[in-house]
Amino acid sequence: MKTAVLFVRTSTQDQYERGFSPESQKKILQEAAKNHDVVRTFSLAESAKISERRKQFHEMVQFVKENMVDAIFALSHDRLARHYKDFATLQSLIDDNGVSIVLVESNKTVSKDSPISDRFLFQILAALAEADNRKRSADTKRGMAQAASTGNVPHLVPNGYLNVGDEKTRSVIVDEKRAPLIKWAFEAYAEGGWSLTKMAAELNARGLTFKPSAKRPERPITDGNLYKTLTNRFYAGEFKSGGTWHKGNYQTLVSGEVWQKVQSRLNDNLTASHPETKKFFAFRPYLKCGFCHCSLTAAEMPGRHGKGHFRYYFCTSGKRRVDADWYKKKFGTVRCPQRHWKEAEIDEAIKKEIGKLYLDDVIVGEVKKQLKETDERQDKYERRELLRLEKERTRKRTHLKLSYRDRLDGMLSVADYSEIQTGIQNDLDRIEQDIKKLSQQNLKAREQGSQVIELLNGVAKIYAKADMETKHEILGVLLERVVARGNDLFITFKEPFDTLFDLGQMFKDKGKWGE
């Protein structure tokens, strides 16, 4: 008898109430898998964080691989996964491990022997799930923007402050343990006579630490941390959300005057950078270390005996900043075991991977169709959002006029009217910025769509002949990341190119559409 695992996931309380509880899903899946030996059930609760969901999903994938499980049963594709990376992992299970994916609601089974049309439909469902994720993200960002416009901070606050309450009653309070020391740091640095290194040591001696988080423990202050703190406008009463600065309704630790004085001293004390002397490294934004997950940096080094110069990419060994013995405990080495990579090696690997892209008229037509549909959805969203912003702008202008009339009638003092006027003008400035940003986002989406169409034909030849700056621009459209580990480079492309690579290979290997 073939073996199977069941995958149960609930994401909202509403689904619980409509009968999508783990128990009801499990019952349905057990009935569907009655001809299989169910060796394990994986269940994700609605309250799980995104990182936890990903962790448990990969635990299931690992279990399936290690135990050579034949099938995965799930209620539907969006119950199984909602992230294109997870769907890519499932595709790998199908192709490399011979696993069948059974979607009970739609009565669909996707396996290695499925027709290309079924596999393509599975890819489309993955794209839809990803689009739904992005829509939810956009809704969340709109909610955060609305909260920020009223002075409420919709994100985690820096050291010296604490987030309290839930999503509906969220507010910011002063951290009584750390705030006095941070306030002292601003005032002392403004007076002069301190370097960042000396002040960081003094703050550590006085007991200042960074507050612990879900991912990082409580830790001491470093020069870099202190610089970020002293340049953060949050402490003077302003915070940035969605690319726009807002005046917060929380207690400030320093005055605007002190903050400006600190910035002046920092500018005087720090060595100015010279952009014209900086080296350009085309692959640096995309490279990650496969050992410790830190970014790779780059440098130009002279060759042996002074012959020529070579460009290398290497791991920053960034885990040492938090735990000096991290690499010793993990790998038995002082630094990350990642080797140095020559730029030419990375370039050749990417060029080879791009060369695998196979396209025919069917695929090109499907991509153009998806781009057109995306553009239409973007237009619809832009019109709706623009209408909302224009209504809000009209409401604010009306409020400003009424306030002026109240001032003329003696119902408002000069100070009260000035405060109201400043607040409304800030809101109007923010609305104008949002309107401008909205049009820029749509323009950028169209530019990227145009670049996608241009790259659909002859991308391998275009990349091979391009200089490094042009390659960097091409990769900005194509490339998600490159993970280096040992002697291997694992290259991941952005949507829709990752799908195109998979589909192209299937078409190339198996023939025409529908066979």
Image (cartoon, rainbow, N blue to C red):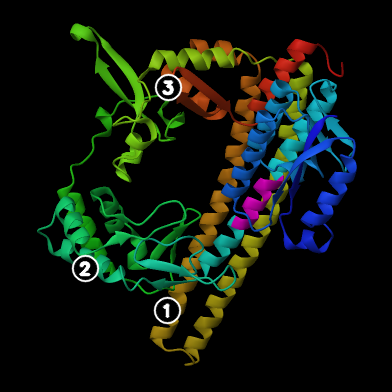
Q: Which quadrant: the C terminus?
A: top right
Secondary structure category for the residue under label 2: helix
Q: State which tag comes first along the sequence, 3 or 2.
A: 2
Which residue position holds label 1?
419
> What segment is highlighted magenta in the picture?
132-140
Q: Does residue 39 appear to the left or right of 85 in the view shown?
A: right
User: Image quadrant of residue 399?
Assistant: bottom right
Identify residue for label 2: 184
- Residue at x 31% of width, y 31% of height: 335
Q: Main secondary structure of the magenta part?
A: helix
Q: Which residue is mark 3?
A: 469
Query: Toward which corner of the image does residue 209 lie, by quadrant?
Result: bottom left
Q: Residue 139 lies in magenta, yes or no?
A: yes
Q: Nearer the viewer, residue 444 or 357?
A: 357
Answer few, some or many: residues within 10 Å of disc 2's Cα (few below 14, many 20 plus, some between 14 and 19): some
Vertical placement of 461 versus 381: above or below? above
Q: Are marks 2 and 1 in contact (CB under 8 Å)?
A: no
Looking at the picture, which amino acid does disc 3 mark?
Glu
Mark 2 vs 1, N-terminal side: 2
Report the amino acid beneath label 2.
Trp
Please state the horizontal and vertical placement of residue 173, each as a whole percent of the image: 41, 73
